[in-house]
Image (cartoon, coloured by chain):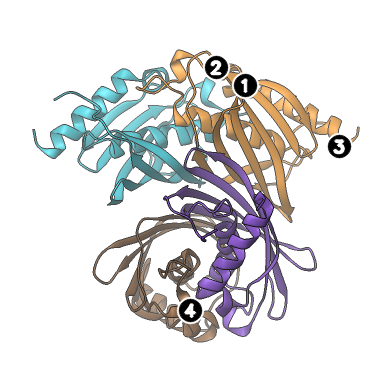
Chain colours: A cyan, B orange, C purple, D brown
Amino acid sequence: MDANELASKVAGAMLAAEGTGPAWGIRIEEARAGYVRISMTLRADMLNGHRIAHGGIVFALADTAFAYVCNGRNERAVAAQASIVFLGSAQEGETLLAEAEEMASEGRSGVTRVAVRTNGGRAVAEFTGYSRTIGGAVIEI
Amino acid sequence: MDANELASKVAGAMLAAEGTGPAWGIRIEEARAGYVRISMTLRADMLNGHRIAHGGIVFALADTAFAYVCNGRNERAVAAQASIVFLGSAQEGETLLAEAEEMASEGRSGVTRVAVRTNGGRAVAEFTGYSRTIGGAVIEI
Amino acid sequence: MDANELASKVAGAMLAAEGTGPAWGIRIEEARAGYVRISMTLRADMLNGHRIAHGGIVFALADTAFAYVCNGRNERAVAAQASIVFLGSAQEGETLLAEAEEMASEGRSGVTRVAVRTNGGRAVAEFTGYSRTIGGAVIEI
Amino acid sequence: MDANELASKVAGAMLAAEGTGPAWGIRIEEARAGYVRISMTLRADMLNGHRIAHGGIVFALADTAFAYVCNGRNERAVAAQASIVFLGSAQEGETLLAEAEEMASEGRSGVTRVAVRTNGGRAVAEFTGYSRTIGGAVIEI
C-alpha cells in the first residue's frame, strides 16, 4: 500500500469508528498523505444565538480534518494543542469545507494547518494544530 | 439590575437562543460578571475513535463558556481567536465542567481563560479566547 | 529547601545562565512555587517602526517568565507551544511587568498564563504557554 | 509600482525604521506580495541557559517576518494575536530563516503563517499570526 492509499484508509477508518463524524454529517472529499479535505453541512443544531455557525462546531470540523491528517501514516497521534482564528460567518444550509495540510513533522511532533471555507469560497477560519504521536497503529494492515 | 444579574440573564438568553447548547445538553451552573461555569455530560456521539471525548467537543464546551463570559456586560462580542491545550481524556458518561474567567479587557478586546475538568477534578483542557465587541446588545433590558 | 525557595533559586540560576535575560535587562521581582513576576525597561532597540514595543520583545519577556515558572520544581521543562494576544502598546522608557502563574499541570504537561502590563497598570498582552518536562534537573541541590 | 515592488519597499522601510531589526541583525532575503523571507544569525545574547536559541528570539524573528507580510499592501496593520509551536533547537552561530506567507485575508483581518528553519533545513518553529489593519499607510508613495 502506498502512502496515499494508507492515509485514505486511515481517514475512512477513523470516521467509521468515531461518534462525532457521523453525528455531524462529516464527509471525506479527499484524503492522501499529508492532506485531507472534508465537508459538513450546517444544521440548526450547529448555530449560535445569532443564527450563524457556532465557533465550537467550526473548530470541531477543522479538528476532525487535523486528526485525519496527523494519523495518516498509521502512527497513532493526538492533538496536543490547537489555535483558531475566526474570519467570517456561515449560515444554516451552507456547506463548510475544511482543507488540512501537514506543514511540518519533526520527531514525534507535527504541525497541521486547516483552512475552513464555505463551498462558495468565503474564508471562515484558519486553524493550526500541534500533534504528538503516542505509539501504536490506527488500523491493522 | 447589577452586573452579576445582567451577566446571568445574558448567559441564560444565549443558551435559550442557540442551537448548539440545547443539542449538546449544556447546563449553566453559575454565571456572574466576568465568570461562568457550565457543564455537559459526554454522550456516545461526542467521542472520537478511541472512545474518549473528541477534541472538537471539548473546545466547543469551552468556547460556549467563553461566549457567555465575553457577552456578559450585554455588549455583543464575538470570538476572534482561541487556543486550546489538551491535558487529559474523558469518557462517555463523565460530566465535563468548563469554568471561564475574564482575564483582561481593554477597549473592544477581551481575553478569557477557560479550564475544562471532569466533575471528578481531572484536568482535560486549558482554553484561552480573544474576543472583540461588535456593537449592539444581546438582550433587551 | 521548600518549594518556594527552590522555585526562587531555579529562576535566579536560569537568569544567570542565559544570554537573553541579562541582554534584555530582565529583573526578577518575585519567584515562588507556581508564580514569577519579572520586569524589563523598554529601550530604543526594543521598539518597532511605530516607536512602540515590538511584539517580539513583549513575547520574549512573557516567555522568559513562563520558562522560570515551568522549571520551578527543578524538573527541566521546555516550551512546546505558546499563544499571545496583544492588548495595548508601550513606549520607550516604560517598564513592563510580566506576571506568570501556572494554571494546570498534568503528567509531563503544564500550562502557564502570563499577563504583561506596564508598571502604570495598562494591559499590554496576555500569553499562554504549554510546557513539557524533558527529564533532568535545572540546578544541583 | 506593482504589488511585489510595493511589498518589497514596505519591508525595507519597516526594517530601516525599527529598533529591533538592526539590533537583531535581521536581513531581508526576499519580499514580494504576500511573501517574505528573512534571516538572522544566532548570537550568544540570543541563547537560553541550555545554550540554544531562546524561544523569545525565535518568536521575535517570526513576528518580524509576519509584520513585513501583513503590512505589504502599504495598509498599516498590527499583530492582534499569534501562536507558535517549537519543533527543534538551534545553536549559536547558526542562521535562522523565517519564511512568511499570507494564508488568508478577509476584511480588516489577515492570517500569516511563518516557518522558521535553520539554513541547514531543520525545522525550528511554526508560527501563525493574526493581524488587523488599523488605517493609514506605512510609506509615502
Chain where mark 3 sits: B
Q: Quadrant of residue D102?
A: bottom left
Three-letter amino acid code of the residue under disc 2: Glu
Q: Which residue is mark 2?
A: B94
Chain where mark 4 sits: D
Task: Looking at the picture, tell me which residue is in the foreground, A113 or D111.
Answer: A113
Residue A118 visible in the snapshot = no
Q: Position of residue D110 (x, y in %)?
A: 48, 57
Kindly identify the residue that appears in the image at 68 percent across and 42 percent down.
Answer: B77
State if disc 4 and disc 2 touch (CB < 8 Å).
Answer: no
Chain where mark 2 sits: B
| Dot 4: element | helix
Number of numbered discs? 4
Chain where mark 1 sits: B
- Mark 1–mark 4 Cα distance, whole angstroms, equals 47 Å
Q: Residues within 10 Å of mark 1 (few under 14, many from 20)?
A: some
- Mark 4–mark 3 Cα distance, whole angstroms, equals 49 Å
Q: Earlier in the sequence, mark 2 or mark 1?
A: 2
State if disc 1 and disc 2 touch (CB < 8 Å).
Answer: yes
Q: Quadrant of residue D121?
A: bottom left
Task: Looking at the picture, tell me which residue is in the foreground, C81 or C13.
Answer: C13
Q: Which mark is residue D45?
A: 4
Q: Earlier in the sequence, mark 1 or mark 3?
A: 3
Q: Which residue is mark 3?
A: B3
